[in-house]
Image: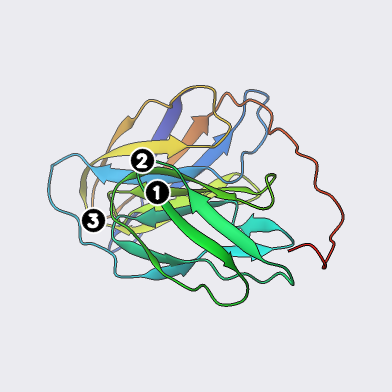
Amino acid sequence: MMFMLAVAAAPAASAAAVEVVARDSAGQPVADAAIYLVSASGGSEARSQRTVAVEQVDREFVPYVSVIQVGTVVTFPNRDPILHHVYSFSPAKPFEIKLYSGKSPTEVLFDHAGVVTLGCNIHDWMVGYIVVVPTPHFARTDATGVARLRDLPAGPYELRAWHPQQRAAVAAQPLTLAATASASAVVDFVLQPRKAKYKPPLDRLKY
């Protein structure tokens, strides 16, 4: 797994931007990869005060992977006509929201960096991930494997990446940005296949 980086001057840009392409060992695009830049200068990063939602739709977590900054509050609205029981045993944020439907009965503050794995105590095929990062500079790759980070202050960074199916951690890549520069990078993942779990037909009489 490696990064390939190219930097070029950007015309009349007031801040830097980075476009990252994630691909697998066959050269195919990788969706749902967390991409983020951490300041290498050790300076403090402004904390987000945002609230984001991870929904339950068609008995799945949507989005499958979320990327948020430390200090973000997350709600878990249930859009299904049945109950869900959302939990995490991850050290970065253990929590539990017992059987409910509709509006999220509680908000969860994610106050530590790390990967949080989500599950449903009723539907064991439901799995989702929240990647909590110590920086406001992050994105998730789309269906084409592309993530774009904009409005970046000049300075030195580490470019980091993570994916739920990666076989090993991806090494951080040093990157220095000027105020009027843009950059592009390629992240190569070695992935294991996502294991499919049996999902029975919806039965509105059972949760």
Q: Are marks 2 and 1 in contact (CB under 8 Å)?
A: yes
Instruction: Answer whether residue 148 is visible to the viewer in this image.
Output: no
Nearest to N terminus: mark 3 or mark 2: 2
55 left or right, relative to 58: left
- The residue that label 1 is drawn on is 94
Residue at 55% across, 57% down: 86
Dot 1, how many residues are within 10 Å of its Cα: few (below 14), some (14-19), or many (20+)?
A: some
Q: Amino acid at mark 3?
A: Pro
Find residue 25 and report its horizontal and vertical position in percent: 63, 23
Nearest to N terminus: mark 3 or mark 1: 1
Q: Nearer the viewer, residue 50 or 12?
A: 50
Q: Nearer the viewer, residue 23 or 83?
A: 83
Rounded to the nearest whole Å, what is the CA distance between mark 3 and mark 2?
31 Å
Q: Amino acid at mark 2?
A: Pro
Residue at 23% across, 56% down: 153
Residue at 62% across, 69% down: 78
Find residue 205 and report its horizontal and vertical position in percent: 82, 67
Where residue 189 sits, quadrant-wise, is top right
In this picture the colour scheme is: rainbow
Dot 2, how many residues are within 10 Å of its Cα: few (below 14), some (14-19), or many (20+)?
A: few
- The residue that label 3 is drawn on is 153
Rounded to the nearest whole Å, what is the CA distance between mark 3 and mark 1?
33 Å
Q: Looking at the picture, does residue 127 appear above or below residue 167?
A: below
Please tell me the numbered disc located at residue 91. Answer: 2
Dot 3, how many residues are within 10 Å of its Cα: few (below 14), some (14-19), or many (20+)?
A: some
Q: Residue furthest bottom?
A: 103
Callout 2: SS: loop
Residue mark closest to the camera, 3 vs 1: 1
Find residue 183 and report its horizontal and vertical position in percent: 39, 44
